[in-house]
């Protein structure tokens, strides 16, 4: 019986930021080895080692050769489960130049001749999150080419502020792990630290790490747990079940053994295998049948996004709606200011004469039909593709992509749209809106599987799913510091990458190309004004162009303009900038931008709104008539 | 007075009912027009492809002196599109033009100089871009027709559809010749 061939893992050391070589390599790997370019970008850029692919050794060697050519360190290792879980530290002793770590089962000695790997990890995930936020902020402000992860010192500080754990692995002379210890802060007797011991559990952990550093000559400190994309090493958070901490410790063990496997291996080097010299990228592109892409590659992210355009004051219906809201709020505020008696009297009059129930019934009826029409519009419009959008009312689904470097003012997240409202508590303990703003003047892209298209969100009814609320303990770039507990802000964000549904009017943008006929006419007009050029077509030299000569000149100019237009085609605006989806001219046609996974979900929401509104209208009219009956009775 | 209340509630129910009927009717009208619009939008792209062809032929003529038959086939198919009358005839002419274009691009493989020509490459890209868009818009047309066909057979829309004579619309059907498997003879390769 033949044994099944083992699965191999190709692990590569991530690089801090994107570069042109990597941008060329990704599509090549995608075509030659069917690797996902997006995943490759995620895994190759960042911090720590990442799993690139798994499978047979031959296939992985091909990928590794290409990675090595681009100066990316990588390893091919067999996939094996951990041999043992590190023993829990209970106490420690120092003496004779050695550090003895005491566990329930045995003592483990660390001496200067030992090689040790220390893994300092944060089980809470805060350090990983901090690194992610740091990378995102850098990406927002510096672009993808200028990103660098947190330094070791910063990361160590972040880990120690979370839920730190220290794993120590000792290697024997053959480079294999022969012992492992897990140190949890506060779960061991620190008396062995002597005068160095502190009252802080985390402080004692730090001191152990320093002691290990002083007792062994070859110590390798690894801080990448939670940041590295390795199989079975994903960090769980508290909302992922009761046993998230136990699962994180298991993931840490797997991470430790994977790092231990990488430690004694040399990075993959094709020269060792005695293979022929590595083919160049150009040769490989030719082998696949493609041209060498000109950098930057089409579709690769630009170095940095432009700053959002300033607000032009031409906002659509959002502002009137807000103005109406303000007017109602002001009216209500005025009534409350004038006095409760007047408000109570107005309400009483409205109820007694059935005006209020009638208004309520009318509003419910209007609302019911509004949502019914909206639902029908969405149901009746087929979904278009970005590549082949026709002008007119269109429906699109895809992911939001930023066109400008827009960042939400409070949570500092890269986003395509934000809406922020600031409230202040009044003397009666009610929240009153004091400031409101949004980014509806900033266009963005919607990307589906065929391409992307510009969205101008002015005047759209935008529903978001990400909402944050805070009471005066955060600072924002928009409002400055919100220090008082009598203030709060509410921020709604459509973050980059969110799945969006859009129903709106597709129209040509200002960047549409000039028709060829116009260019030819202009070229002919220029020719007529230029006697030298005209002389070029005067074949018989009589000083004037006859009909045949003019036809020849015309044909030659047409040919020239055509060739020039085709040669410059790459400079013309691409589909994403040629077509823009905006508010329809007719107000009765909706413009909806909704953050939702499916159209069905949105339609169901509108159905759920329609029925209670119609029921409310019926109840309202019954109430009105009953009130009228009482009012009209003598 | 109770009678007035009853009448009032009845009037509102009637208003909601009439409003609902109007919404359904308007929806069906908009769906029917969507189909016509989707059909016309395909025509827009077919016209664009039609306009690009003389440029392509002009560029090819310079290189393909020995492929006059292929070029003539494209020119003939183009003129057939121009003279076609009626939906069925137009469809057939467009399919024929697509086929001759495919043959042209296959023949181009024999002319490396032409393949390397920037103008030809740009034109080729432009035409294949239009072809992709045509395929998308055919799909869109079928979606629009399908939505309409489903709607007129669903309750309560079927009542309005029957009353106002909304009839089924046919989907875009592919030429049966294009459904056949491609025969590959490895002995001649």
Image (spheres, rainbow, N blue to C red):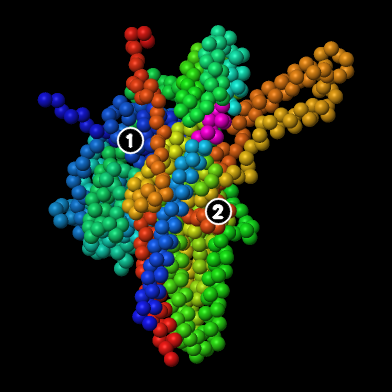
Please tell me whether residue A440 is drawn above or below residue B148 in the rendered image. Answer: below
SS for dot 2: loop
Residue A580 visible, this angle: yes
User: What residue is disc 1 on?
Assistant: A53
Which chain hosts label 2?
Answer: A
Image quadrant where residue A337 sits? bottom right
x, y percentage for residue A119? 31, 50
Residue at figure coordinates x 43%, y 56% from the top left:
B23
Quarter of the image with the C terminus of chain A is bottom left
Image quadrant where residue A197 sits? bottom left
Q: Is residue A530 left or right of residue A11?
A: right
Residue A64 vs residue A286, the one in the foreground = A286
Which chain hosts label 1?
Answer: A
SS for dot 1: strand
State which mark lies toward you, 1 or 2: 2
Q: Residues within 10 Å of mark 1 (few under 14, many from 20)?
A: some
x, y percentage for residue A125? 34, 56
Please tell me whether residue A282 is drawn above or below residue A477 in the rendered image. Answer: above
Which segment is the magenta one? B42-50
Q: Which mark is residue A583?
A: 2
Of the numbered discs 1 and 2, the one sitting upstream in the chain is: 1
Residue A57 vs residue A31, the one in the foreground = A31
């Amino acid at each position: 019986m033949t044994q099944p061939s083992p699965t191999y893992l190709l692990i590569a050391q991530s690089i801090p930021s994107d570069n042109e070589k990597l941008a060329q390599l990704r599509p090549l790997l995608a075509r030659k080895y069917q690797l996902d370019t997006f995943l490759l970008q995620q895994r190759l850029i960042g911090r720590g080692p990442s799993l690139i692919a798994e499978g047979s050794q031959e296939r992985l060697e091909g990928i590794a050769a290409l990675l090595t050519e681009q100066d990316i360190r990588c390893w091919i290792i067999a996939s094996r489960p951990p041999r043992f879980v590190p023993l829990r530290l209970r106490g420690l002793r120092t003496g004779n130049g050695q550090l003895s770590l005491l566990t329930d089962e045995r003592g483990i000695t660390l001496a200067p001749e030992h090689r040790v790997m220390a893994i300092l990890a944060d089980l809470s995930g805060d350090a990983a999150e901090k690194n992610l936020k740091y990378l995102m902020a850098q990406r927002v402000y510096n672009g993808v080419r200028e990103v660098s992860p947190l330094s070791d010192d910063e990361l160590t500080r972040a880990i120690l502020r979370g839920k730190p754990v220290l794993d120590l692995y000792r290697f024997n002379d053959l480079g294999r792990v022969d012992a492992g210890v897990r140190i949890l802060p506060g779960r061991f007797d620190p008396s062995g630290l002597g005068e160095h011991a502190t009252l802080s559990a985390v402080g004692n952990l730090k001191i152990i790490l320093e002691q290990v550093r002083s007792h062994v000559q070859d110590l390798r400190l690894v801080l990448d747990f939670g940041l590295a994309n390795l199989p079975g090493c994903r960090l769980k958070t508290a909302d992922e079940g009761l046993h998230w901490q136990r699962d994180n410790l298991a993931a840490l063990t797997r991470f430790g053994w994977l790092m231990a496997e990488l430690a004694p291996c040399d990075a993959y080097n094709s020269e060792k295998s005695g293979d022929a010299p590595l083919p160049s990228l150009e040769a490989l592109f030719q082998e696949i049948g493609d041209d060498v892409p000109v950098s930057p590659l089409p579709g690769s992210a630009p170095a940095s996004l432009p700053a959002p355009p300033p607000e032009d004051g031409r906002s659509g219906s959002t502002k009137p709606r807000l103005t109406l809201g303000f007017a109602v709020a002001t009216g209500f505020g005025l009534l409350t200011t004038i006095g409760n008696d007047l408000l109570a009297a107005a309400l009483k009059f409205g109820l007694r004469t059935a005006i209020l129930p009638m208004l309520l019934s009318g509003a419910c009826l209007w609302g019911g039909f509004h949502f019914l029409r909206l639902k029908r519009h969405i149901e009746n419009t087929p979904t278009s593709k970005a590549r082949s959008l026709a002008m007119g009312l269109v429906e699109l689904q895809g992911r939001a992509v930023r066109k400008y470097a827009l960042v939400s003012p409070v949570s500092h997240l890269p986003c395509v749209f934000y809406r922020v409202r600031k409230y202040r508590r009044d003397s009666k303990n009610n929240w009153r809106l004091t400031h409101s703003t949004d980014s509806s003047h900033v266009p963005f892209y919607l990307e589906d599987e065929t391409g992307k298209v510009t969205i101008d969100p002015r005047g759209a009814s935008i529903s978001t799913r990400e909402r944050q609320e805070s009471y005066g303990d955060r600072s924002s770039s928009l409002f400055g510091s919100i220090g008082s507990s009598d203030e709060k802000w509410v921020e709604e964000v459509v973050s980059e990458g969110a799945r969006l549904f859009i129903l709106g009017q597709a129209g040509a943008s200002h960047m549409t190309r000039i028709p060829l006929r116009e260019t030819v006419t202009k070229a002919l007009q220029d020719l007529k004004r230029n006697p030298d050029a005209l002389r070029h077509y005067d074949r018989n030299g009589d000083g004037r162009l006859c009909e045949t000569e003019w036809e020849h000149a015309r044909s030659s100019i047409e040919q020239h303009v055509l060739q020039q237009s085709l040669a410059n085609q790459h400079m013309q605006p691409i589909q994403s900038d040629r077509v823009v989806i905006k508010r329809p001219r007719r107000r009765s046609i909706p413009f909806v931008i909704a953050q939702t996974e499916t159209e069905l979900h949105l339609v169901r929401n509108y159905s759920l709104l329609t029925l209670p509104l119609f029921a409310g209208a019926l109840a309202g009219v019954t109430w009105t008539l009953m009130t009228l009956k009482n009012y009209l009775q003598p | 007075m109770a009678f007035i209340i009853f009448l009032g509630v009845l009037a509102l129910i009637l208003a909601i009912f009439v409003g609902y009927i109007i919404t359904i009717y308007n929806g069906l009208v908009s769906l029917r027009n969507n189909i016509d619009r989707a059909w016309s939008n395909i025509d827009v792209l077919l016209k664009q492809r039609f306009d690009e062809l003389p440029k392509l032929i002009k560029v090819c003529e310079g290189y393909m002196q020995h492929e006059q038959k292929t070029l003539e086939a494209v020119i003939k198919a183009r003129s057939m599109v121009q003279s076609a009358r009626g939906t069925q005839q137009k469809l057939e002419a467009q399919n024929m033009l697509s086929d001759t274009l495919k043959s042209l691009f296959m023949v181009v493989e024999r002319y490396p100089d032409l393949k390397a020509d920037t103008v030809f490459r740009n034109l080729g890209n432009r035409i294949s871009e239009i072809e992709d868009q045509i395929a998308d818009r055919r799909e869109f047309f079928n979606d629009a027709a399908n939505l309409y066909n489903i709607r007129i057979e669903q309750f309560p829309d079927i009542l309005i559809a029957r009353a106002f004579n909304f009839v089924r619309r046919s989907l875009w059907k592919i030429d049966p010749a294009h459904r056949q498997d491609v025969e590959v003879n490895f002995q001649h390769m």
